[in-house]
Amino acid sequence: MRSALALVLVVVLAALMMAGVSQLPPPGEADQAVHRHVAANYLADGVEEGGTGNRVTAVLLDYRALDTYGEVVVIFAALIAVLLVRSAGGPRTQPPPRRVPVSPVVDQVIRLMTPFIALFALFMIIEGHVLPGGGFQGGVVLGALMILLSLALGPDRLRGALHTGALFWLRAVAPLAFTVSALAGLGLVGWWFALPEPGWMREFALVLLELAIGFGGAAALTGFFLSLEEDIHR
Amino acid sequence: MTGLALTAVAGLLIVAGCGFFLAGTIGLLRLPDFYCRLHATTKCDPIGAVLILTGAALLSGPEISTIRILALIALIVITSPTAGHALARAGWHAGHVPWTREPGNEPE
Amino acid sequence: MSPNDVFDLLILTLLIGCALAIARLKDLAAAVVLFSIYSFSLCLLWVHRGAPDVAMTEAAVGAGITAVLFFYALTRTGRREK
């Protein structure tokens, strides 16, 4: 009965999606409306209007800043959900996993690689408005580095090394920065998420936004991991 | 070295690297237990990757990307054996007994 | 069919195979590993299609972080699907 219901549901959904897809313009045709107006505008004016040579960044942080705002808020909401749910679980079904002492080889290699990984993450965040990459990617690499350090050195030493008060606020920095950007654009230029006028100011604002996304994302991931860790070894 | 010889050497290196990858994959599929499979993959994968990357570096010539390829080689040489070591250690701590030919010690 | 299309088709076949295997597997740890493979294949496809930004996100988020978080979640819930 349930599988029949699932089959009907899948067939109906598939039919709807097929109907939608069949209405799309054929891919790769340059003279469709979407390519003639919006995309062509982005390609022609993206460098001047977005304040950067990377048009992907121009779309992410300027033209479609509202969408990026939504993404940032979703990550923040997920973090809040994890923090709310983690202590609400019932009696545990699994025994807590045994901690294996970290091997000295792994410890040394992680110590060796940490500065390089951190440098790479920062490079991705700061240069993200010019090169491929950006706040999201660099932030995830930074968060992965934090998880690596927590696995190697132990979560308690990581917690001790991180300023927990700063971490608390860093988790919210990306939505906050986007809110400030939206309001500042409305107040100073006249529309939501508008970037300030001279070119160097635009670039500065982009770097600030990327930094906020990067560090906010890294703090959110570190928060996910540390709360999961705490929950498992409670 | 002339261009043709350089290309030939690079091609040989890449083919040799693919051979190592093939051997490692066959070992992963065919060997009896965790440690043997780990042995096959953690030996063959780094050397295969290093050979292929060296070939690619030879092909790309004196460019900025060659330096990136060399950095990648250094990264693989450092991290790949470490990952193998960590996996074997985790397996040992999880209670995997190495396979032997004695009866009563069949692979899982 | 150009070599580029052949490459894309190979990757897409691998993706579909991985997705089916993930759906069918009862061993959730193996499913997480397969999910990493799926993400790396998708990452290759993005690079090949000229979208390095998306490829970087896919490699970092899909193949890196989610696998770690899934493994940690598995230690709380158990490895076998019931």
Image: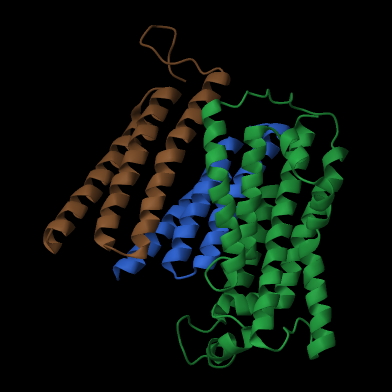
Chain colours: A green, B brown, C blue
- Give the total number of marks visible in the rendering: 0
Classify C19 as above or below A33: above
Q: Residue at x 55, y 74 (%)?
A: A130
Q: Residue at x 67, y 54 (%)?
A: A6
Instruction: Say left or right for B71 vs B95.
Output: left
Position of residue A154 in the picture relative to residue A133 (left or right): right
- Residue at the top extreme, as displayed: B103
Instruction: Where is residue A63? Give x, y as percent.
Output: 67, 82
| Residue A202 image position (x, y, % from top left) | 67, 82
Look at the picture and state if A185 lies above or below B5: below
Left or right: residue A58 versus residue A96 is left
Q: Nearer the viewer, residue A27 or A63?
A: A63
Asked if one can make out residue B7 in the rendered structure from this viewpoint, the answer is yes
Note whether residue A73 is visible: no
The quadrant in which residue A56 appears is: bottom right
What x and y, as percent, mark residue A229? 74, 36
Percent position of residue B24, x then y: 33, 36
Q: Residue at x 65, y 33 (%)?
A: A153
Q: Quadrant of residue B8?
A: bottom left
Q: For the C terminus of chain A, which image quadrant?
A: top right
Residue at image location 57% in from the left, 82% down from the top: A23
| Front residue (pair C32, B91) | B91
Taking the image as shown, residue C31 lies to the left or right of residue A226, namely left
